Image (cartoon, rainbow, N blue to C red):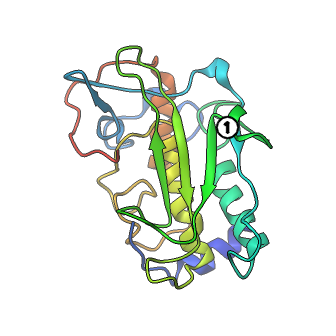
Amino acid sequence: MPAAARAALAAALVAGCAGAGAGANAGPRDNYLRHVAFRLLNESVLLRWQDHEMPLQVYLPRPPQGMFDDPEAIFEVVRDGVTDWADLAAPGVPSFEFVDDPGAADIPFRWEERPTGKWFVAHCVYDISPRQRRFGVATVLVTARHYDGSDVSLELLYLTVLHEMGHALGLGGHSPEPSDVMYGALAQQRGGLSERDRNTLRALYDRPNGSRVVGARRERAY
C-alpha cells in the first residue's frame, strides 16, 4: 500500500489489539528496549535472529480461495507488514526472502477465517529454547476479519501485521508509548513505524543474542 494511502487511512483509524546508528547511541527515551526482553530462567534477556540467518525465509501463501472478498489486496497489505521492517537495523538486517515451502520457513504465516482465542487479526507464536537462547517463530496467524466475522480495514490489517512482525523479529514486549506501533493496543492514529520503533529494533540488533537486561519491565506479549 502506498505511504500516502496509509497515512490517509490512518487518520480515520481507531482500533485495538533517528538516523543511522541510532540504536547504538539512543537513550532510554529514544527506545523502549527494556520493555521487550524475554523473561527466561529467572533472567530478562534479549532474543533475536542472528545476522548470519538473514535473509529470513518467510512463507506467506495467498489467502485460500473464497476466504475473503479481495484476497489480492489483503495479501499485498500483509506482505507490506513484513517487508516494511527490512534493513532497519543495518543493511540486510533484517531482510526477507519469500519461499513456497512452509517447512523451509523461519517465519511461516497461516491464514484463519477469523480470530480464535485471545488474539486479534494477527498473532505471533514463538518457538523459543530458553537454555540455548534460541529464538524462533512457530507461526504467525493472520485473518482479515473481526471476531464477529466482519471485515477489518486494510489499514488495521497492515498495522496489526506490522506489530506482530515486530514480535517475530524479537521485540518480546510492548512499548509504553501509544504513538509507537509496538504499543500494546493499536489505539492511536498513525501510519506505520515510529522512530522509537526503528531505534528499538536497531538497539536490539546492536546487542548480542541472549544479552541480559538490567531493569527490564515485566509486561510481555507472549
Can you give x and y, in whole percent of width and height, for residue 124 in the image?
48, 48
Q: In this view, does 102 lie to the left or right of 29?
A: right
User: Going 37% across and 63% down the picture, which residue do you hit?
Assistant: 117
Report whether residue 146 is seen. Answer: yes
- The N terminus - image quarter: bottom right
Q: Give the camera-side residue of 161 and 23.
A: 161
User: Going 69% across and 57% down the picture, which residue do you hit?
Assistant: 80
In terms of image quadrants, where is residue 4? bottom right
- The C terminus - image quarter: top left
Q: Give the camera-side residue of 84 and 49.
A: 49
Q: Is residue 127 left or right of residue 177?
A: right
Can you give x and y, in whole percent of width and height, for residue 93 in the image?
65, 31
In the picture of the structure, the residue carrying the numbered disc 1 is 87
Q: Is mark 1 on a helix, strand or loop?
A: loop
Report whether residue 193 is seen. Answer: no
Q: In this view, does 131 lie to the left or right of 21?
A: left
Can you give x and y, in whole percent of width and height, for residue 98 in the image?
77, 43
What amino acid is found at the position of numbered circle 1 in the picture? Asp
Farthest-out residue, top: 132
Can you give x and y, in whole percent of width and height, for residue 116 in the image?
43, 65
User: Going 57% across and 40% down the picture, which residue do you hit?
Assistant: 19
